[in-house]
Amino acid sequence: MADKSQIEVDHLAVGLTRSPTFMGINIRLFFANIVVCTLICIDAHTVLGIPLFIILHLSIAKLSINEPDFFSIWVKSFFKTPPVLNSHFWGKTNSYEPW
């Protein structure tokens, strides 16, 4: 009979390797969201920054479900795989594009 083995997960080690989150999203994105929405409220003299904050927060939370560092990975992909110099010759294709 085959023995079903379980993979042990050390929850302390997993927690130490993840980025800090606040209200379900990366703490940097949370404070960036607050700053942008506050500046919109101040500049436009309206409270429309509050619903914008909620919409942005929910969309970031949806993207953060699988990977809390999705934004930093997404930004790094632009620097690590820039468009090639002969992209005008090949059209809109980029063989180095990760997606």
Image: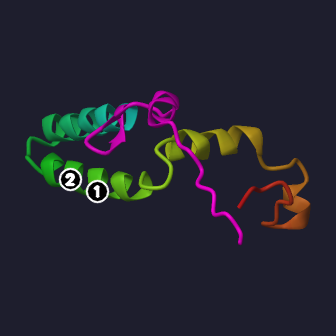
- Residue at far front of view: 1
Q: Amino acid at mark 2?
A: Ile
- Residue at far top of view: 16
Q: Is residue 9 above or below residue 97?
A: above
| Residue 12 included in the magenta stretch of the image | yes
Q: Horizontal placement of 82 versus 84: left or right?
A: left
Q: How busy is the neighbourhood of tag 2: few (under 14 within 10 Å), some, or many (20 plus)?
A: few
Q: Horizontal placement of 24 versus 39: left or right?
A: right
Q: Could you tell me how far apart the alpha carbons at marks 2 and 1 are, in whole angstroms?
A: 6 Å
| Residue 13 included in the magenta stretch of the image | yes
Q: Which mark is residue 10?
A: none
**Which residue range is magenta in the image?**
1-27
Q: Where residue 39 sits in the image (x, y, percent)?
A: 22, 34
Q: How busy is the neighbourhood of tag 1: few (under 14 within 10 Å), some, or many (20 plus)?
A: some
Q: Which residue is mark 1?
A: 58
What residue appears at the point 79 percent right and 49 percent down from the top-left corner?
83
Q: Where residue 18 sits in the image (x, y, percent)?
A: 48, 34
Instruction: Give SS at disc 1.
Output: helix
What residue appears at the point 48 percent right and 55 percent down from the top-left corner?
66
Q: Which residue is mark 2?
A: 54
Q: Is there CB contact under 8 Å for labels 2 and 1?
A: yes
Q: Where residue 46 sits in the image (x, y, percent)?
A: 8, 46
